[in-house]
Image (cartoon, grey):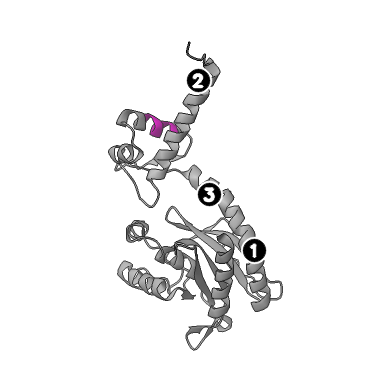
Amino acid sequence: MPPVVSASAARGVASVRAVQRAAAILRCFEGRGLLGLADVARAAALDKGTTRRLLLTMMKDGLIARDPTSERYGLGPLIRRLAADVTLEVDLRAIAAPVLAELAAELQITAFLSVYQNAQAICLDRIHDMKGMEVRWWAVGGTLPLNCGGAPKVLLAFQSDAEIARALATGLEPMTPRSVLDPARLRSHLRLVRRRGWDLAVDDVVVGLTALAVPVLDAQGALVCAISIAGLTPQMVSRGRPVHLDRLAAAAGRIAAQLT
C-alpha cells in the first residue's frame, strides 16, 4: 500500500516546487538585460504557460518588471531593495570594515565599499576618519552613475562585454563637466582600468575631489566588490599619479584573502 501523504504535506511540496521555479526564473536574468517570454521559458527549462503564470505572480510582488514598450521582462524593484541585506554582503561588510577603518585612519580620508548589481554601482559601506574631511557624496545604499567616480568605473570595467553594453545602453549621466559622456571614450577607458587594475577619478563627481578605486577579486579572478578612497585632489594626486595606490591595493589583497 503506498504511503499516505496528507493534504498539508502535498501543499508543502508544491510550494517548494514553485519556489524552485521562481528561483530558476530569477537566475535567467543574471548578467543579462530584458528577456522575452520564450527566452525566459527556455533558460528556466519551463513551458511557456507555467513561465507566464509565474512571471505575472512575481510582477505583483515586485520581483519581476515588464517593459511596456517591448513587453520584455527584467528584475523588479524589490530585488534592489533587498540587495543591501543579502547575507553575503553583510559578511563582506564585516570583513572589509576593519581594513577600511584602518585605511581611513591612516590616510585621514573617506573609504568606500561598493558592489555591482543590476547595472548599478551600490555603496555598501562608507568609513570616515574624524581627523580628515568627510566625503559625503555617496551614501550607504546609494548609487552613482557608472561613468562617474572611481569605484563605479572599476565595477563596470570588470563586467562582461555584454553587461557593459547593457549598462551603457541605459545612458550616461553627467555629474560635473569632467564626467565622460561619450560611450566610445568610456569603453576605451574601461579597457585601461581593467588592464591596470585601478581608476583615478578627478573632478567627475564633485569638482575638487578625487577618488581612487581598485577591485577585490576572488581566487578565480572574478570581481567581488570594489574599495575606494576619496579626498581633496591635492591629497590624492601627485604629478598626475595616485598617491595611495600601493596602500589601497594592499588593503584589497587583505580583504580578498579573507574571502577564501
- Measured as percent of width and height from the top left, residue 48 is found at 30, 31
Seen at 46% across and 72% down, the residue is 204
Q: Main secondary structure of the magenta part?
A: helix
- Residue 57 part of the magenta-drawn span: yes
User: The magenta stretch spans which residues?
Assistant: 53-59
> Label 1 crowding class (10 Å Cα cut-off): few <14, some 14-19, many 20+?
some
Name the amino acid type tagged 3: Ala
Name the amino acid type tagged 2: Ala
Q: What kind of element bears circle 2?
A: helix
Seen at 54% across and 74% down, the residue is 249
Q: Which mark is residue 26?
A: none
User: Which residue is disc 2 drawn over?
Assistant: 10
Seen at 66% across and 68% down, the residue is 101
Name the quadrant containing residue 177: bottom left
Number of numbered labels in the structure image: 3
For the C terminus, give its image quadrant.
Answer: bottom right
Q: Is residue 210 left or right of residue 37?
A: right
* Labels 2 and 3: the sequence-earlier one: 2
Establish if 185 lies above or below 91. below
- Measured as percent of width and height from the top left, residue 142 is found at 54, 57
Q: Which mark is residue 83?
A: 3
> Label 2 crowding class (10 Å Cα cut-off): few <14, some 14-19, many 20+?
few
Establish if 189 lies above or below 15. below
Name the amino acid type tagged 1: Ala
Establish if 116 lies above or below 247. above
Q: What kind of element bears circle 1?
A: helix
Looking at this view, name the residue that lies furthest to the bottom.
239
User: Which residue is disc 1 drawn over?
Assistant: 97
Q: What kind of element bears circle 3?
A: helix
